[in-house]
Amino acid sequence: MASREVDSAPLASSVPASAEALASAGRKVRQRLVPFLFLLYIFAYLDRINIGFASLQMNAALGFSSAVYGFGAGIFFVSYTALEIPSSLMLARVGARRWIARIMITWGLASAAMMAVSGPASFYALRFLLGAAEAGFFPGIIFYLTQWVPAAQRARTVASFMTAVVTAGIVGGPLSGALLTMDGAFGLSGWQWLFLLEGVPAALLGFVVLRWLDDSPAEAAWLTAGEKAALLSKLAEERANNRERSETLASTLRHPWLWVLSAVYFVIPVALYAFGFFLPQLLQGTFTGTPFQIGVLSALPYLAGAIAMVLTSRHSDDTGERRWHVAGGALVSGLGFIGAALVHGLVPSLAMLSLAMLGLASMFGPFWTLATSFVSGTGAAAGIALINSVGNIGGFVGPYGLGYLRDATQSFTIGLVAIGVVMMAGGAVVLLVPDRNRAPRDRTAG
């Protein structure tokens, strides 16, 4: 299979890597690519979890139980998982620019179409379609970053990009709450306006992708020749020093540690999407405010997560350690979920939910840096997609399980405790994985 991975040989062999040029290239990559990818991921995550706020009106309007809602929320990940690897391999084949644009246009339209939900069947169908449309986006971005960012700076770069998850929660909560107040305008319900006005911008951004992204550093007109050579040389050097890594789809599927990492990653979507899809309802159970007020309060756990994500990833890069950063975050998050199940009242619940998100968010950067240390070449796209697709089964299990247990027990308590235990188990398993990035951060690369 042809791959669009950077061919660094011509430039890398003719010009030695310069520390100054490498640092300059790193700054330009972070300034041009990371903010834009951050913006794209805000809309990706927002369009996944905005049903959490839509449920404050939609469930009652359409007669959805917690189990029906949880199943519809989670079925997104069935199609997403099934198409994750094929989509990621297509990205490696045709290039990130065109494939990411395709993903965004189709998912934006599918998200906006959620305004047409009229019952369980259409709810399940449109959520399934949304998952199919978005499949490959996140692993595609992670793969794309491996083509631009040396390993020593990757945790903080991935974390900078992934702060979009928590930023979407910080911004999306108040925004979604405000959109719900449009209930009745032009004959549409507030939840219908929410889907429409948060879906269309994603589709429009897909066209911007075609103008803004380059498939590789060699094609970047905004880098000087010296910067290109230094960056490509550094990336080629890393690939040469890791020839034992999985470089093809077949070798990736046979790699035992990637399957272990997939099991570890499973716990993250279990918690992340159970949290995102049910947070408004959890807050509504302790606070009788308006949807906008609930949206504002929902931003607080995500704010705690954003701070923890940045600080933890910086520390992980500076020390070169990955596993214990992931395990520690899992432990803290697990304790937060269990605490949220046991306390009562708005303030204690918010504190425990903030602790849960704080630990969860701090895992992202170190985890993906550890995971990408085992793969290269076309195998990188497949390996990242394998971990993300197997792990994202948790995106179905978490919301559906929490919704089912909520209906069965008339309480969120058992479901939250179960998520906490699963998180701590994942933290224990990651310590079995060898850490391939023990060297401290290379400060010459900026």
Image (cartoon, helix red, strand yellow):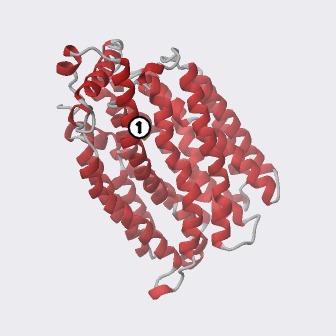
Q: Observer-nearest residue: 212 or 301?
A: 212
Which kind of residue does numbered mark 1 sit on? Arg
> Residue 267, relative to residue 254: is it above or below?
below
On the picture, is 344 further left or further right than 374?
right
Q: Residue at x 33, y 39 (%)?
A: 85
On the picture, is 309 further left or further right than 285?
left
Q: Observer-nearest residue: 6 or 423?
A: 6
Quarter of the image where the N terminus is located: top left
Q: What is the secondary structure assignment of the residue under circle 1?
A: helix
Q: Observer-nearest residue: 82 or 352?
A: 352
Q: Residue at x 52, y 64 (%)?
A: 51
Q: Residue at x 27, y 34 (%)?
A: 223
Residue 55 location, x and y as percent? 57, 68
Residue 408 location, x and y as percent? 68, 59
On the picture, is 441 further left or further right than 351?
left
Q: Residue at x 41, y 21 (%)?
A: 374
Residue 413 location, x and y as percent? 74, 53
Quarter of the image where the C terminus is located: top left
Q: Which residue is mark 1?
A: 30
Q: Observer-nearest residue: 237 or 137?
A: 237
